[in-house]
Image: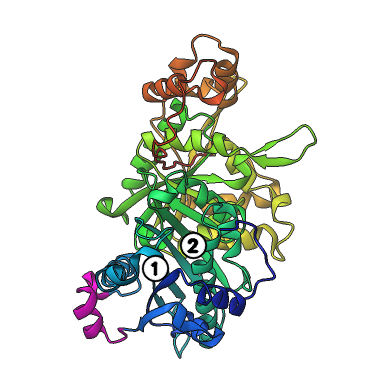
């Protein structure tokens, strides 16, 4: 079907187009946040051509009886959504395949959502997915996403769920051959002020060439979300599900490539964070962060673009080291901390290099804030957060917190932060690492110079050589197009 994105097709037109397609037939199961997705198909007309069944197991006892008991009694979860898709799609095939399977592409749509409550004390969000065939008697594919509902009104949030659901079903059947168009179409008749999509996953035989790590990147790139997370196995994860009620240690970097100093920074920083008296060592997650700015490379015309292969190269390496990866649009550290603070109230650690300490205390970066640097510091340091500073070598001198001299009018503020255990030097680092610069290692790799291997972890050197990463000169074997995309995860550093 067509992969040309027509923004002028409205919600009613999309629903009607599906209703009038005799090959598309399926069921709807919706829990919470109204029943607006199926309602849009009923209102469009000719719904009997599409809808085999609609239902809502709104009561928890009914829901558990149909889809199985939920662990922890949380119903707005990915696990509940998958249970709904499995049961509803299974019933479709069981009851209708023999009768109309030769000329029908079946689908099951499900969502479980929590809209704003009466007292407006919760954050609206939901899980949504479609299990569908692309040809009669074909295998099924899944598209699953998580949405944050931002409208300040319950009815508007329900309406947004209804529009998004129609967009998702329409994209599954009409834009399935172009993931970028698929993603962009999800926002038709919606805005980034109304919803954020912070996780999406494509699975199934027709999506084997879709790299879900790139889909995470695109969510942030298109502004659908401020951040996206995926695990060491390359699977996209919903940030709140992974980070909720965790101690988070984050390290930011470009990692082109990751070198020994990055690992030393990460290991020593995490070790010191674990020694903090108010940290539960059994409840810590380490996250490596890549920002959009760190992924962009300047072209000859001074424009900045993201090289997707380069992004995947970095992620593959981070993943091989077992990292959980965060892609974000947070250029400033206070924005990162503000985002994470909405997910966890526990203490967090930020591991960064000495140059980033200088950056944080440069007032020029806060001109867009009415309160300037004080406003940013109120966000960055008022939370349960601590900065761990890795030293830098300049002209034979090791620079760290003790040698840092902010502008005179900020000296007392800096001393206050040091005295109140908000900033601390990383100890027990490997001084030999300070003589190595990431950019110089990258140059050596590109130039084919000898000796660069000693500056990177052994497994990283092997990957660079085997896969000709970062401009390393070698011949790659013919690509196996059926091979599943490699997984990925990330680490963050300020070196």
CB under 8 Å between discs 1 and 2: yes
Q: Residues within 10 Å of mark 1 (few under 14, many from 20)?
A: many
Q: Is residue 421 visible?
A: no
Q: Nearer the viewer, residue 443 or 483?
A: 483
Which of 275/42 is in front?
Answer: 42
Asked if the magenta segment contains residue 215, the reply would be: no
Start and end of the magenta stretch? 57-73
Quadrant where the C terminus is found in the figure: top right
Using residue 281 as the reference point, say whether residue 242 is left or right of it: right
* Residue at (46, 89) in percent of width and height: 119
Q: In the depicted view, which residue is nearer to us: 154 or 128?
A: 128
Residue on which the image places disc 2: 172
* Residue lying farthest to the right in this orientation: 301
Q: Is residue 16 above or below residue 467?
A: below
Q: Is residue 406 left or right of residue 107?
A: right
Q: Is residue 174 above or below residue 44?
A: above
Left or right of 188: which side holds 146?
left
Circle 1 residue: 107
Whether 67 is among the magenta residues is: yes
The one nearer the camera, 359 or 43, is: 43
Q: Position of residue 96 (x, y in %)?
A: 30, 72
The percent coordinates of residue 464 (x first, y second) are 46, 23
Residue reaching furthest to the bottom: 118
Crowding around mark 2 (Cα neighbors within 10 Å: few <14, some 14 to 19, many 20+) is: many
Above or below residue 309? Residue 350 is below
Q: Main secondary structure of the magenta part?
A: helix
């Amino acid at each position: 079907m067509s992969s040309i994105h027509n923004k002028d097709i409205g919600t009613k037109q999309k629903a009607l187009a599906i209703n009038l397609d005799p090959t598309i037939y399926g069921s709807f199961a919706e829990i919470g946040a109204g029943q607006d997705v199926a309602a849009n198909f009923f209102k469009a007309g000719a719904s009997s051509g599409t809808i085999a069944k609609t239902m809502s197991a709104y009561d928890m006892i009914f829901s558990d009886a149909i889809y199985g008991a939920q662990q922890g009694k949380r119903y707005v979860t990915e696990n509940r959504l998958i249970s709904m898709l499995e049961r509803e799609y299974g019933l479709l095939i069981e009851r209708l395949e023999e009768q109309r399977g030769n000329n029908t592409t079946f689908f099951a749509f499900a969502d479980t959502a929590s809209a704003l409550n009466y007292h407006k004390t919760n954050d609206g969000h939901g899980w949504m997915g479609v299990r569908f065939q692309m040809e009669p008697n074909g295998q099924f594919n899944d598209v699953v996403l998580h949405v944050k509902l931002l409208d300040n009104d319950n009815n508007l949030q329900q309406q947004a769920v209804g529009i998004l659901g129609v967009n998702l079903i329409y994209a599954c059947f009409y834009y399935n051959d172009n993931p970028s168009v698929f993603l962009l179409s999800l926002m038709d008749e919606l805005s980034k002020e109304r919803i954020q999509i912070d996780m999406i996953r494509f699975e199934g035989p027709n999506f084997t060439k879709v790299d879900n790590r790139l889909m995470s990147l695109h969510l942030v790139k298109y502004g659908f979300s401020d951040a996206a997370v995926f695990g060491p196995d390359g699977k996209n994860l919903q940030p709140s599900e992974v980070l909720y009620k965790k101690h988070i240690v984050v390290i930011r970097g470009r990692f082109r490539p990751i070198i020994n100093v990055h690992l030393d920074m990460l290991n020593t920083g995490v070790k010191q964070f674990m020694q903090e008296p108010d940290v539960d060592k059994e409840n810590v997650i380490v996250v490596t962060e890549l920002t959009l700015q760190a992924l962009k490379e300047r072209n000859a015309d001074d424009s900045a673009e993201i090289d997707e292969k380069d992004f995947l190269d970095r992620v593959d390496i981070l993943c091989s080291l077992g990292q959980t990866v965060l892609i974000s649009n947070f250029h400033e550290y206070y924005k990162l901390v503000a985002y994470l603070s909405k997910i966890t109230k526990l203490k967090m650690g930020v591991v960064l290099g000495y140059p980033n300490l200088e950056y944080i205390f440069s007032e020029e970066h806060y001109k867009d804030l009415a309160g300037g640097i004080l406003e940013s510091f109120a966000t960055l340091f008022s939370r349960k957060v601590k900065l761990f500073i890795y030293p830098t070598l300049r002209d034979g001198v090791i620079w760290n917190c003790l040698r840092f001299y902010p502008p005179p009018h900020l000296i007392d503020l800096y001393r206050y932060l040091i005295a109140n255990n908000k900033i601390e030097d990383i100890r027990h680092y490997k001084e030999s690492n300070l003589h190595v610069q990431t950019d110089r290692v990258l140059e050596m790799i590109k130039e084919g110079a000898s000796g660069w291997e000693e500056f990177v972890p052994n497994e990283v050197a092997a990957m660079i050589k085997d896969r000709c990463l970062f401009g390393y000169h070698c011949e790659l074997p013919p690509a196996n197009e059926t091979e599943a995309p490699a997984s990925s995860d990330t680490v963050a550093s300020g070196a």
